[in-house]
Image: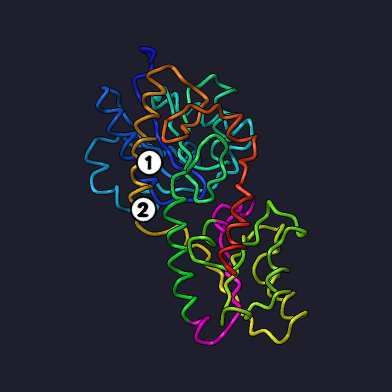
Amino acid sequence: MAKRKKCIGILTSGGDAPGMNAAIRAVTRTAIYHDFDVKAVYRGYKGLFNEEIVPFKTQNVSNIIQQGGTILKTARCQEFTTKEGRQLAFDTITKHGIDALVTIGGDGTLTGARIFATEYNFPIVGIPGTIDNDLYGTDRTIGYDTALNTIMQAVDKIRDTATSHERLFFIEVMGRDAGFLALNGAIASGAEAAIIPEIATQEDQLEELIKNGFRKSKNSSIVIVAESPQTGGAMHVAELVKKEHPQYDVRVSILGHMQRGGSPTANDRILASRMGEAAIYALLDDQRNVMIGIRNDQIEYVPFIKAIKNDKPINRDLLNTIRILST
């Protein structure tokens, strides 16, 4: 790391994800271990406009690894999408003596970081914090495992009432542009089908489920639906089924923001801790404009442009897994 980089700024932006606090803790303590100052920016990029910037010491991140959400708060920031706004943000960073930034968030966070880093030749390292698991270049993102477990637990409970009343339940989960939560949530909970944005209607398992009669071998069925516009969401799918198959007792459950909350799992705490430490080592290695990724359990530096622009492929073989295991 070049000598001029003596102060590390850290912020969380976009949707919160369980494990963000573990990443904040790791970044802070690794930076302090290497004799850097740390300044925390509250409320994401918006905090750069309001100058919500405070020095962080090791005690500031004590007893937060088990907490969901983010102690730094998060907010949307329209101002940061403008050139004038980014100039004001750069002026604030300069004023507070911040030499490099670590940003924790999803696609929008990294997109803003890439533009800012390019315009001002400013060192930024991103940490992927999003429950959607949709960033290219990393096998997992912080918060995904916790959200997946939350979905599994919720579906387990819904299954009890679905079985008792012999109902067909459509359960909507998050994943506007990616079906990782819906697909793997369906496998983990033993659902009969998953409707995801990556798969066109001709490959939709729902038709096969209805065609064979969802009560053929079971007295209830669960279908997981990603909230994406491509799927129409659980309400839309349920209405179609009720219209075409009025004999079925159809119900809808939308899990919503409960998927974002809760204490992070061990996997997310470990992942966030490793990525937070790696972010400081990336700066020490004079890396910039990169996201910390993990592939085959090994830390990698992924250029922002690749993480943002490339679509992360979904394993379509898992749809066949659901089909086979739901018979």
Evaluate if marks 2 and 1 touch, with contact meaning CB atoms under 8 Å apart. yes
The amino acid type of the residue labelled 2 equals Pro
- Which quarter of the figure has residue 181? bottom right
> In the drawing, what numbered circle is on residue 272?
1
Which comes before the other along the chain, label 2 or label 1? 2
- Residue annotated with mark 2: 264
Q: Is residue 232 left or right of residue 258?
A: right
Q: Residue 201 versus residue 32: which sits nearer the camera?
A: 201
- Which quarter of the figure has residue 254? bottom right
Residue 199, compared with residue 271, is above or below; it is below
Q: Residue at x 47, y 50 (%)?
A: 144
Residue 100, compared with residue 168, is above or below; it is above
The amino acid type of the residue labelled 1 equals Ala
- Give the SS element for disc 2: loop
Image x and y of residue 58, in percent: 23, 36
What distance separates the C-alpha of mark 2 from that of mark 1?
Answer: 10 Å
- Give the SS element for disc 1: helix
Image x and y of residue 311, in percent: 64, 39
> In the drawing, what numbered circle is on residue 129?
none
